[in-house]
Amino acid sequence: MKAAIAGASGYAGGELLRLLLAHPGIQIGALTAGSSAGTTLGEHQPHLPALADRIIEPTGPDTLSGHDVVFLALPHGASAAIAAQLGQDTLIVDCGADFRLSSEADWTEFYGGPHAGTWPYGLPELPGQRDVLANAKRIAVPGCYPTSVTLGLFPAFAAGLVEPDVVVVAASGTSGAGRSLKASLLGSEVMGSVSAYGVGGTHRHTPEMTQNLSAVAGQPVRVSFTPTLAPMARGILATCSAPATPGLTKARLREAYQEALKDEPFTHLLPEGRWPATAMTLGANTAVLQVALDERAGRVIVVVAIDNLTKGTAGGAIQSANLALGLPEELGLPTTGVSP
Amino acid sequence: MKAAIAGASGYAGGELLRLLLAHPGIQIGALTAGSSAGTTLGEHQPHLPALADRIIEPTGPDTLSGHDVVFLALPHGASAAIAAQLGQDTLIVDCGADFRLSSEADWTEFYGGPHAGTWPYGLPELPGQRDVLANAKRIAVPGCYPTSVTLGLFPAFAAGLVEPDVVVVAASGTSGAGRSLKASLLGSEVMGSVSAYGVGGTHRHTPEMTQNLSAVAGQPVRVSFTPTLAPMARGILATCSAPATPGLTKARLREAYQEALKDEPFTHLLPEGRWPATAMTLGANTAVLQVALDERAGRVIVVVAIDNLTKGTAGGAIQSANLALGLPEELGLPTTGVSP
Amino acid sequence: MKAAIAGASGYAGGELLRLLLAHPGIQIGALTAGSSAGTTLGEHQPHLPALADRIIEPTGPDTLSGHDVVFLALPHGASAAIAAQLGQDTLIVDCGADFRLSSEADWTEFYGGPHAGTWPYGLPELPGQRDVLANAKRIAVPGCYPTSVTLGLFPAFAAGLVEPDVVVVAASGTSGAGRSLKASLLGSEVMGSVSAYGVGGTHRHTPEMTQNLSAVAGQPVRVSFTPTLAPMARGILATCSAPATPGLTKARLREAYQEALKDEPFTHLLPEGRWPATAMTLGANTAVLQVALDERAGRVIVVVAIDNLTKGTAGGAIQSANLALGLPEELGLPTTGVSP
Amino acid sequence: MKAAIAGASGYAGGELLRLLLAHPGIQIGALTAGSSAGTTLGEHQPHLPALADRIIEPTGPDTLSGHDVVFLALPHGASAAIAAQLGQDTLIVDCGADFRLSSEADWTEFYGGPHAGTWPYGLPELPGQRDVLANAKRIAVPGCYPTSVTLGLFPAFAAGLVEPDVVVVAASGTSGAGRSLKASLLGSEVMGSVSAYGVGGTHRHTPEMTQNLSAVAGQPVRVSFTPTLAPMARGILATCSAPATPGLTKARLREAYQEALKDEPFTHLLPEGRWPATAMTLGANTAVLQVALDERAGRVIVVVAIDNLTKGTAGGAIQSANLALGLPEELGLPTTGVSP
């Protein structure tokens, strides 16, 4: 199998390349980008010496065609036009948001502009989703925050253990914002500081969480989501909670999570008494979870750690691509973090 | 006025000294500690060259007596015995937890051991609290997390804008854990990682938040509190939310906060559209806040940033001590952060 | 005394304002900037709530005139034109490089363009320099790296203890690069990473070090200088070494430093056995030093820590301005760091 | 092939396990430790979920025998006794210092206690060393700093381009100090701060650098080495310099490095104009280098970045073990860093 990567000079593109360099079933084909076309990859991704001398080509049908799979790591709004030019036989895996939401109203409200459509959603852990992905030629990779929150709460909703009134506060590393040149992302501003942004339900990942959890719950789920920026390059720690249904016990809660996750290759429910840290997942395609029942407050609390660039973007993309290409789902995907 | 500092070799003690060195109304008297007695302060607080050669004395009535105010920055459980030996005329300001909780049941459940009692609570911003502190000879300095959460939510509860069902997720810098030698606090473990701890309502600061907010609300308030550890030395960012009461508007919410905080010297409500970052408060006695109404989720969200060692401990202690000593409340307390 | 700050929206400008807010002898007058003119200071310096609502004015003779002292924190090349418009009675303190170098050849080689001239050099610790500054109406504030290196090595050269062949490797926090929007300064790139830049004698601060040390040594001094970028917002740790002159003993070396620094208010020679850390100086106008004699390698090693924005820029500027304004040199300048 | 890891609960042990989990030619056998024996590996290495339930056994001949290779990641002084019990047919790879130095005098001066002896030195890049390692049953893995400095300077000494008078200043991440519980290694102390330690030629890695470089140079080389601690968990950036021999040109210098490194799988000489950052090597077995000739100062400057735990310890250990086991040298060793 041969893969093209569009957006090879960005953080998501770099992570796709890092993982594909160690993937035994997928070869790296064309590397493309927009304004970086014509430069070497080494200028942008100096941690990938094996590809340092590769020249980045312009993103377009000429450079992207002729591959079994095309990974798109592009700004929002760019994927539809490219996909239209690539033909139905090529697997297209979009790391952007364009095809994640099924509700046109949500799309318009949170992203603006015309809704491009909806592609099969690349979160294999969702009930029934592996079958959908096995036959897909188009895949919408979930957002990084929705990946963490959906993995954290779907077992509780699937088992009917919580009320549909979710509060999420998540800390993300700065790579989640990409390589954009904003003063608020300068090292001088982010080091030594945790800050809030997109407060009050305005973050674009909010409707995606609502969509996923409502589908599992079989009823509308309200989500209050507050993202925060933490002084680290990678990682998401999502603290998710919802009111416990009456009579829920700690044993029942834990059992539900064990049951729901027991065959999952990329989730790791910690032993009781230990709590996730993003460092456990650095560079790994793993989501590390723990659950608690706060009986005094009447809430179930789930904490989830992922690497936003791996399980949250590029690793998740390859996991779904493996399924769609008929490869073993786990192929080429590390479950081992780099720590300390 | 002359102050003694018990626990001068720790982080809270160091911050007390940093602030008192610039305080025009309080002189630094005895510096005491436990196992560090006999060493110079410079070995423990190399950022305070003006005191580098001062010898730390043992903590006890001999060394602490003869001061107008004694600041205790000691492990839990040590304050009562010392206070008993110091006489009723000396102002004692306890940065520890011993005298914060009025409920003996809460004390026993969360701290264990006998309840030492309850002292006037050192949060001047709480309605009516300045009068209490003006005549106090004993002050219990609030915990760092409860400081941030109480400042963030008391205006909403005082104005009846939220239901008594609070969810707090807060990120703290590592200095909140003191200078304890634990592997989980090593730089190698905390850098590049956000982690959860004390999940499920087990953190000791939970009943203190409940106590404060219930008093303001005039009814029992439930608090689900999840602390997380962020890769920074100082700072707390607390994201607090509660269901909005029916009919609440954004204008009414903002107005309530403006009204409640308009005369406060140490709170800073940001202009609309901007959000707190802990860097705004580094080394300052300021709490920086912002509020939002998430109409879709039906919740009020308040984000508060403080420096856990300044407004959250030593600065708050001096603010209350100023009141009790008859000094201007703001004396010697910076509102200016060190940034970037 | 009343001060105007040109470049108030940048890091150096913000640090000047932070210090001047606590300065009892200088009031803050006009705040000016280039592209930020017309916005509030709070948008750029949210850590300074006392000035949050001040409107930034355009930089020019209209806004800057009528002050006793004007601090310029501008890009290179902008200071001469402004100074020419401000009259000889106004003290002008330039935090930029324009007037630091006496050699036109050095200026041309390292900065390019015409040499603006040479102003009195704002490093009061240099022998004889306090007299120069006491009568100055124009002051060139040293660069941050040269401040650290000159303070570290002038005692050795003044006492003839080292050969004129210096090697300096220094680590700087990212604020040294200002608020420039470069990908290499993004948090994602700098966190968790130390990198080199300007290697091989190409950094612009190199000739300034050579100039200062040669003047003290009374002979040409060669300097090999390598700057590195460390994952912190503030601070410089400079490791400086030079061959020891024959027969030098540890006792003689230490004595020379004690003697040279004994009356200096802003240097702190650590006790033997302890070594500088930048955290000791965060936000303080202090340089913390230590010296060693490596007899096997035949070199004197001096390690110096400063805060690049305080002693390295804004604090140093105010220290020199105090002298030129006839104020006590130490007025308004903290020697206490913010730590941990 | 089957490997035992002694010291599995530490940082070096964890890195060995991370790499071996992805090594196609070596299986993981016994995991042993001292005080951690009897606990699960997951308590100490939560980033390795695949081994989370493995019980750590006590370190001793019973647990370590029966393996093709035994990796020792133990405190200094413990390796000799264990090696004596394991027989001559087992490959023993010691990540500690016990067998690195050939000079008993150096050992005694820098480490104290009896000199255990000298084992083949595990740096395959040194001229002739691959042959030595191909037949070795005992390997002394180099120290992390000496790895970086030796790789950086051996080409210059081998080609006779520099004088034997080296100055090295290196920044290391905190994991280089292991998981030791010292206040100076707490996150609160190291974040936001660069500090010096072991100044003046006292660091134990100094004689190892001298030994390596003198061997290549064919004459005694003096090394002035200053280590510094940087606020990051992993990585070493070593800035090495030495006087250029007369007449050296930039072209000749670069050519010598290209020639010396052209067939090396684990070194990466950057294109001209770009400089190493430790982030380029995070988790990779790669050393990234760049060279410069500072004609004014008359020095060659080489900057080297490695991951202290990978190329600097565990990766280097496996690289040498591959050679000694008759496996391809590169087997199982990533050259791709995790970035950003």
Image: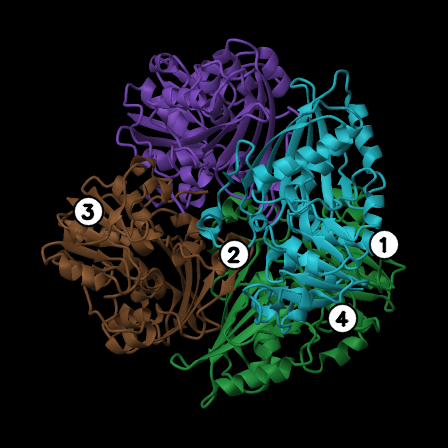
Chain colours: A green, B brown, C purple, D cyan
> What residue occupies the far top of the structure in this picture?
C218
Are the residues tagged 2 and 3 within 8 Å (C-beta)? Answer: no
Give the quadrant of residue A117: bottom right
Q: Nearer the viewer, residue A75 or C311?
A: C311
The residue where tag 3 is placed is B3
Chain ID, mark 1: D
The residue where tag 4 is placed is A330
Q: Nearer the viewer, residue D53 or D303?
A: D53
Q: As shown in the figure, which amino acid type bears the numbered disc 2?
A: Val
Q: Nearer the viewer, residue C231 or D107?
A: D107
- Asked if C170 appears above or below C140 in the picture, the reply is below
Q: CA distance from mark 3 to mark 1?
A: 69 Å
Q: Nearer the viewer, residue A309 or A67?
A: A309
Q: Earlier in the sequence, mark 2 or mark 3?
A: 3
Q: As shown in the figure, which amino acid type bears the numbered disc 3?
A: Ala
Q: As shown in the figure, which amino acid type bears the numbered disc 1?
A: Pro
The residue where tag 1 is placed is D328
Are the residues tagged 3 and 1 within 8 Å (C-beta)? Answer: no
| Residues at discs 1 and 2 both on one chain | no
The residue where tag 2 is placed is B190
Chain ID, mark 3: B
